[in-house]
Image: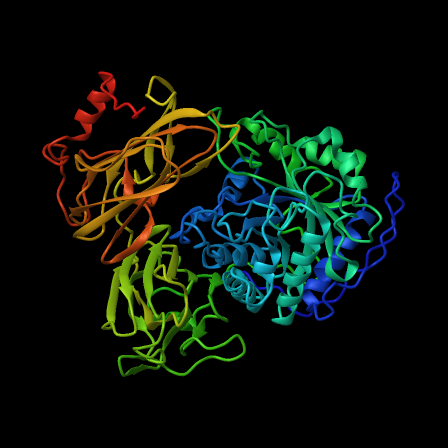
Amino acid sequence: MFQPRQQSVPWLLAASVCLWFAVPELEAQDPANPNTNATARAVLRYLQDLPNRPDKRVVSGQRLHDFYGDAARYAPPTTNSPLDQVFAKTGKWTGIASAEYANWHYSGTSQRVIWREVNPVMIDHWNRGGLVELHFHPIGPSGTIGNPSEDLDQILNPGGAFHSTYMNLLDEAAAGLTNLQDNGVVVLWRPVHDFGGPFWWGGTPDRHRRVWRHMFNYFTGKGLNNLLWVLSSYPTAQHRDYWPGAEYVDILALDWAVDWATFDWQVAGARGLGKPLGISQSGESNGNVFDFRTIINTIRNQAPEMTFFIEFSTGVDFAGVGWDQSIGSGPTGPSGTALLNDPWVINRGEIDFGGGPPPPPPPPPPPPGGDVFLSDLLFTSELNGWGPAERDATNGTRAAPGGPITLNGVVFAKGLGTHAYSELHFNLGGAYSAFVSDIGVDDDVADTAAGGTVIFQVWGDGSLLYDSGVMTATSATQRVNVSVAGVQDLALIVLDAGDGATNDHADWAGASLIGGGSPRPPPPPADGTGFTAEYYDGVDFATLIRTQIDPTIDFMWSTPAPDEFSVIWTGYLEPRFSEVHTFRTLTDDGVRLWVDGRLLIDHWEDHSSAWDAGTIALTAGQRVAVRMEYYKNGWAGEAHLYWSSASRPEELIPPSRVFQALAGWVSPGGTARDKSGTCGALGMETLLVLGVLGLVRRRIR
């Protein structure tokens, strides 16, 4: 079981070490916020002490891919990308997980903070021995993060035209940061960064100092004592010019450390201010294959006082090497492995700021042969949206459990009380035949209360065994009874149904395992991996460049991606519900979408970011062909594909529902189906033939 770190920990005592190079002396500094909690103080002291070590002195970091889209939702296990890719290539988890805290896709001023998607990943990373960094780009009155000529009075002053919108964004961010604080997580908080860059909060030192101090005072006034405030620069070496005062900053960092020839000049601008230094965005932004050993070698030779680096990643170029690549991207795995195995580098599980014992190993499975309540077993891992998951009680607070588990007037003596987002894992050891539970929103949520909408899921060894659909405070209690024969890892997950987690008190009432395990039947072919993607040079599908599997259609491109290219995504969708489904695209530029041979969306012209939609009735378990064509014409572009139905809130179409095959597939309890007659009047084969014959649709000039 992964144990959260203790809130009160002793300071690390760093031994004096004679080093062969000269490291600028850095005296221990108190945190900027005098009410900073003990764990955050220990993390800060840990970073301050790292330059005194002979090795294991620079914490590695990797930025997550952005959670794009207004309806972005956490869908395990893909949203920790590219951390999982880094591990697959290098065998190491980076010490720091980094993420943007606001969605980059919004219409006008409808930006939102995506803490419900990001926090579960960050809590899990923290509990497994890592550190957490979050950065935050709030929009301005013009509906963009750019425009350094915005009137700050309209943003920061009560009564200003944009003040309430801006403060609502801060309140959303504070709610997410409070959730992290309740789960014991310390955050390296890097808001309104790139202070010399082209953002509305930058432009001049006075502007940035005003925005920075306003946010600092507001968040500390709300009791956010788990934050270490990270001030980071555009590559301009201007930390002194933009310095808001030692009482507002804990850590100094460098953004866009990609021009390694000027790295020493950038570092010189941050030295001498008495704060730990780090690299908050590193990499190579020109699309070339990057030798990641450059990072640690440059630190070692030019700036040994650096305490961490965070590799920046976003987008993919056609060479497959990434733009501002992740450590695990493309052919760079060998140099990424060398980086994370360098004797100076600290990875997840090696960070020790409290001197406590390592987490204990996962608990053994329960003895086979009899029935058992899950509330009597240990978790192998636990995530819960508000306080801990409760045993034999409904969800309460971090300090105390709630009342008895009650669903529609029925009181249950046993069970698990959770709050979305929740993810509980149990080690079954293949010893049980079935999982049984009543599920619903607890009666402590009034029928008229806001929120209280959840989705229950049961997973076994990474396969979805049960999905409740959306449940509310007025829903009838559902009974779950699924086979877990042969299952090793059982996961109980509660999602927030896409409308936030307010009042999402979700009960697994009487949750129990039935004894008498037997070998689990083989699953259907594991071909739910995503879309086949064909990338072409030019906007007219002229020259095929590469073919690959894209798990989802969820992309943004900018320079140095080619200005003109086109893509065809194909696959077979398998819906879970027999309902009318709505498909929506968000693209810049042209898009066409066919589902089951029907043209649902046709917006084949140059345009800025725009939503398009179409509907079609689908049958649960029956796979249908899907084809999406897209072209990009200009320096920036994007493509995203969502679906929804009455029982499923809008989401990016997940890879688990997109298959590469149709013939010979057998659904559980069903019979084999072949391709005949399943693709409608214009089937997948016909569409592919049209492409081969060159009858591709040309964009409107």
Q: Nearer the viewer, residue 380 or 473?
A: 473
Asked if residue 95 can be seen in this view, the reply is: yes
Q: Is residue 355 above or below residue 373?
A: above
Horizontal relation, residue 311 to residue 553: left or right: right
Q: Quadrant of residue 545?
A: top left
Residue at 73% in and 60% down: 248
The number of numbered badges drawn on the structure is 0
Asked if residue 173 can be seen in this view, the reply is: no
Q: Residue 75, image x and y in percent?
A: 39, 52
Q: Is residue 257 above or below residue 619?
A: above
Horizontal relation, residue 325 to residue 9: left or right: left
Q: Residue 166, image x and y in percent?
A: 53, 60
Horizontal relation, residue 688 to residue 62: left or right: left
Q: Nearer the viewer, residue 444 or 213?
A: 213
Please say which color scheme the image uses: rainbow
Q: Is residue 319 above or below residue 498?
A: above
Q: Quadrant of residue 358?
A: bottom right
Q: Residue 434, image x and y in percent?
A: 28, 62
Residue at 58% in and 64% down: 4
Q: Residue 240, image x and y in percent?
A: 79, 48
Q: Quadrant of the C terminus?
A: top left
Residue at 25% in and 64% down: 481
